[in-house]
Image: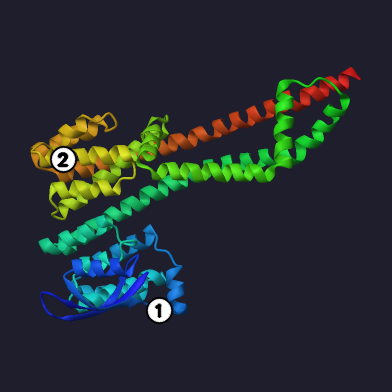
Amino acid sequence: MLYKYRAKNIDTGKLLDGLVEAETEMIAGQMLEEQGMTVLFLEKKKKGLKDLNVQFNTINAKDLVIFSRQLSVLISAEVRLVEALGDIAKQTENPKLKTIISEIAHDIENGVRFSDGLAQYPKVFSNYFINIIKSGEASGRLQEVLLNLADQLEKDYDLRAKIKGAMIYPGFIVGTLIVIGTLMMIFVVPRMTEMLIESGAKLPLPTRILIGLSSFLVNYWWLAVLIVIAVVLLIKSVLKTYRGKKFFDIMILKVPIFGTLFQYINVVKFSNGFKTLTLGGVEVVQSLSISALMIDNTVYKEAILQAKDNVEEGGNISSSFEKSDQIPKMLSQMMATGEETGKMEDVLEKLSNFYTREIDNLLKNIMSLIEPIVMILLGVAVLVMFVAILLPMYQTTMSI
């Protein structure tokens, strides 16, 4: 929700006008106060047709990758930040992102820092993104930080695209099998089983189970739909709890091949994120805290936060990672090398490149396994149909 405001900068005394995105008016006021402003006026922005178009538009990862890359190129060419943002806003096709970039440029002209302008849109720019920019502002290396951030976001986007691309085919196959199986149970099986029932022959257990399941789907399809919806909602509610999410994360890491894939994905995300933060001049403890926010898997998130606590107590990252069963030994060993030599960024870059190649190899292996798995599933389906329907029909026909 967008709120229109007028505020006074406590340090400079300058009046500022702009927009801030927040859940409620109270949160919007708190966000402005945290940025060193005294709020003079604050109200919800009225929505016109253009605003409705902006509201229902989404900003995806690709939009942020393009924005970061364009900004890094313009800043490297020594274009002023406000002018660079203005140029990008003109070129941006996404209406929502165009509006946000324009508002941030307006805020900067009124004396607001770039990072504080980004912080007004927490649903668009992550904590990681904002802290990277903040580190560049503090160190005077915004140009370098933007280049590193753009590289990092591109790598993350490419990784997600690879994984999604690899999962489309198996997802399509499984979905198709489920649809075909359901249609057969509703339309084909009932017709084929009429003759078996009319014959009065004793039906084997697989046939009775298949007929019962088919009858349930035909007569109580609405209940089947409700059960599916209830199961999905139950799983979602369990995953929202910490214990449920952690249990799921532990289980998924134990799945053959896929567990290794998710392990490598988390290592790459951590390596890229931590490297970009340290290159931006963010201190180690804070870098670990922010890196943990980037990780979805609870097991890895806990391992990173434990490493942060260990560093705060005078220890190091590698010794903490060594205690975790889920952290690859290569990661802890390479981190130890980086700590000893002082070349942590180089080590993290090599780790990221190595595990990215491993992910590519795993995805190729998964794709090569899909075809035989599909053939096996089809074979099982044909066998079930033969045993449950065709064999009893043949036996009944032969007995006549």
Quadrant in which the C terminus is drawn = top right
**Secondary structure found at label 2:** helix
The image's mark for residue 3 is: none
Mark 1: amino acid: Lys
Disc count in the image?
2
Residue sticking out furthest to the front:
26
Q: Nearer the viewer, residue 360 or 304?
A: 304
Q: Position of residue 185 (x, y in %)?
A: 71, 37
Q: Nearer the viewer, residue 21 or 97?
A: 21
In the rendered structure, the answer to whether residue 10 lies left or right of residue 271 reads left
**Secondary structure found at label 1:** loop
Q: Nearer the viewer, residue 301 or 343?
A: 301
Label 1 belongs to which residue?
Answer: 46
Q: Is residue 356 visible?
A: no
Quadrant in which the N terminus is drawn = bottom left
Name the image quarter holding residue 299.
Answer: top left
Name which of mark 1 and mark 2 comes first in the sequence: 1
As drawn, 84 above or below 319:
below
Q: Position of residue 303 (x, y in %)?
A: 24, 37
Mark 2: amino acid: Asp
Name the residue located 21 percent from the left edge and 48 percent from the top edge: 289
Name the image quarter holding residue 71.
Answer: bottom left
Name the residue located 23 percent from the left edge and 50 percent from the top edge: 290
Q: Position of residue 52 (x, y in %)?
A: 46, 74
Q: Position of residue 159 (x, y in %)?
A: 36, 48
Name the residue located 11 percent from the left edge and 78 percent from the top edge: 12
From mark 1 to mark 2, how far is it between C-alphas?
46 Å
Q: Residues within 10 Å of mark 1 (few under 14, many from 20)?
A: few
As drawn, 253 above or below 276:
above
As drawn, 134 above or below 187:
below
